């Protein structure tokens, strides 16, 4: 399973995202880490190019109510709405319902353990990279 871990927006605090990326990698996932200061467009383009099953986005800047919906909107525009989006960061409890309604599947807040994230991904992210995804594409990819 392929998971993109990224920092969207101008937030420069990447320690948590790196810890999650490493934990997912150590748990057997293939991880694509995008680094800092990614725009929603950059994140979505990378997710599609890398054929990921899910993306975990870290937002500590307070811009979660803008950035998550923009990423989800771009995924829909590109026909990639089956990529599961989850996130982490400083997200007030009162903002959670709106983000979940927009399509974010889970928000992990400070104090969540890496094992919680790994377990949630295993239980909630369907493996998209199957024969049906390659149907009609280059036979070498089947």
Image (tube, rainbow, N blue to C red):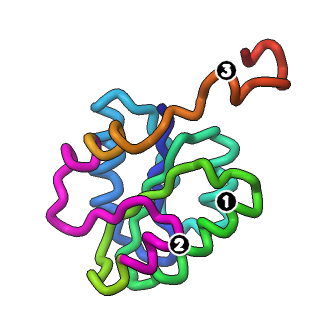
* Residue found at x 58% / y 34%: 128
Judge the density around disc 2: few (<14), some (14-19), many (≥20) Cα neighbours within 10 Å.
some
State whether residue 35 is above or below residue 82. below
User: Of the residues under marks 2 and 1, which one precedes in the sequence?
Assistant: 1
Q: Which mark is residue 75?
A: 1
Q: Which residue is mark 2?
A: 102
Q: Secondary structure at mark 3?
A: helix
- The CA span between labels 2 and 1 is 12 Å
Looking at this view, is 12 or 104 the one in front? 104
Q: Secondary structure at mark 1?
A: helix
Judge the density around disc 3: few (<14), some (14-19), many (≥20) Cα neighbours within 10 Å.
few
Q: Is 129 positioned to the left or the right of 22 in the image?
A: right
* Residue found at x 27% / y 49%: 117
The percent coordinates of residue 102 (x first, y second) are 53, 72
Judge the density around disc 1: few (<14), some (14-19), many (≥20) Cα neighbours within 10 Å.
many
Give the magenta-colored segment's residue range. Answer: 97-118
Q: Quadrant of residue 31?
A: top left
State whether residue 39 is above or below residue 51. below
Q: Which residue is mark 3?
A: 131
Looking at this view, is 136 or 22 the one in front? 136
State whether residue 61 is above or below residue 115. below
The quadrant the C terminus occupies is: top right
The percent coordinates of residue 125 (x first, y second) are 44, 42
């Amino acid at each position: 399973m392929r998971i993109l871990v990224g920092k969207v927006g101008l937030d420069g605090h990447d320690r948590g995202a790196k810890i999650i990326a490493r934990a997912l990698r150590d748990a057997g996932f293939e991880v694509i880490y995008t680094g800092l200061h990614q725009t929603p467009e950059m994140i979505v383009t990378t997710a599609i190019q890398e054929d990921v099953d899910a993306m975990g986005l870290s937002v500590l800047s307070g811009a979660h109510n803008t950035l998550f919906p923009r990423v989800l909107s771009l995924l829909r525009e590109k026909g990639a709405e089956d990529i599961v989006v989850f996130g982490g960061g400083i997200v007030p409890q009162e903002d959670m319902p709106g983000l979940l309604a927009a399509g974010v599947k889970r928000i992990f807040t400070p104090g969540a353990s890496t094992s919680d994230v790994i377990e949630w991904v295993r239980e909630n992210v369907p493996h998209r990279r199957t024969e049906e995804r390659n149907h009609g594409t280059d036979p070498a990819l089947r």
